[in-house]
Image (tube, rainbow, N blue to C red):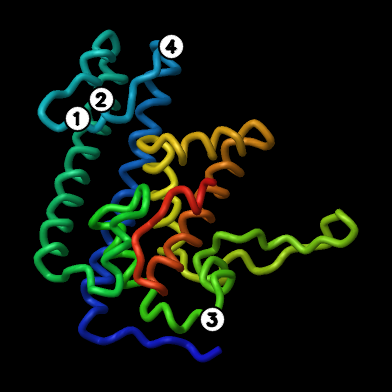
Amino acid sequence: PEGYIYPKEERPVRDLLRKRGHLVKIRTSLVTSLQNILCRNLGRHVMVNEVKRLKEDRVTPMLGESDDLAMAGRVSKETIDYLTYQIHEIEKVVVKRIEVKEEYRFLLTIYGIGKILSLTIMLETGPIGRFETVGDYVSYCRKVPSAWTSNGKKKGSGNKKNGNKYLAWAYSEASDFARRFYPEARAYYNRKMQRSNSVVAHSALANKLARAAYYVMRDQVPFEPKKLFG
């Protein structure tokens, strides 16, 4: 199929949202690293929200018994706070620059998709009509397996990098939020995890949400959880 050229006027905002996603990934790696430091040295797990708390540093005092660990904790916490500030600044600018278009407005009804993710999906997807089937769209979002099988045996795999990595990230984020805040999504995730593992369950839920988004955008109808989760 022919490649799609995004409208020139929308590309700067799209790239700004991509930069936000990049900063979020860096912050997540720093949060995970700091959690590991605390776990290794103190034997305790600290929740992500405690690490990202802006108004109060509850992390550095835990590592006060060692100057080296205290410095590692302080530097990590200050960098996490700085990235959080920059992420919020980008969000403010993006919201002022662009609104969700009428044909994409129902994205906001999908579990796990908020204002920023809906704008990301809108700008990265483009006209939904360029995808003939839901399978085409989900594949473009990198949310289908790339393994080739024959008689139940793996015979190779396709190119995992085909498609849009930013949409893959967006639906992965939506999957995480949906699992945490919506009972139907959490129940589906738990069922999948019992049969496989957390990675497969997370990907399966992201696949579900991408499929739902396709129909929501194509038909311009609100999200219906019963149709997705049964």
Position of residue 100 measured from the top left corner of the image (x, y, whole percent) = 22, 68
Camera-nearest residue between 140 and 59: 140
Report if residue 141 is visible in the image.
yes
Q: State the mark number for residue 174.
A: none
Q: Distance between the residues labelled 4 and 3?
A: 52 Å
- Cα separation between marks 1 and 4: 21 Å
Q: Residue furthest bottom?
A: 2
Residue drawn where x is 44% and y is 47% of the image: 175
C-beta proximity under 8 Å, tags 1 and 2: yes
Q: State left or right for residue 111 relative to residue 184.
A: left
Give the class, few, some or many, for how many residues have Cα within 10 Å of label 4's Cα (few <14, many ≥20). few
- Quarter of the image where the N terminus is located: bottom right
C-alpha separation, residue under disc 3 versus residue under disc 1: 44 Å
Residue at 46 percent across and 64 percent down: it is: 165
From the viewer's perspective, is the residue at label 4 or at label 3 nearer? 3
Determine contact: label 3, label 1, CB under 8 Å: no
Query: Does residue 129 lie above or below 86 as drawn?
Result: below
- Residue at the disc numbered 4: 43
Residue beneath disc 3: 132
Instruction: Answer with mark 4 or mark 3, whichever residue precedes in sequence.
Output: 4
Please tell me how crowded label 1 is: few (under 14), some (14-19), or many (20+) other residues with Cα within 10 Å.
Answer: some
Give the amino acid type for the residue marked by disc 1 in the picture: Arg
Residue that numbered label 1 is attached to: 53
Q: Which of 13 and 129 is in front in this view?
A: 129
Element at label 3: loop
How many residues crowd around disc 3 within 10 Å: few (fewer than 14), some, or many (20 or more)?
few
In the displayed structure image, the side of residue 225 where residue 65 appears, left or right: left
Q: Label 2, on which residue?
A: 50
* Viewer-side label of 3, 2: 3
- For label 1, the SS is loop
Q: What residue type is labelled 2?
A: Glu
The tag earlier along the polypeptide, 3 or 1, is: 1
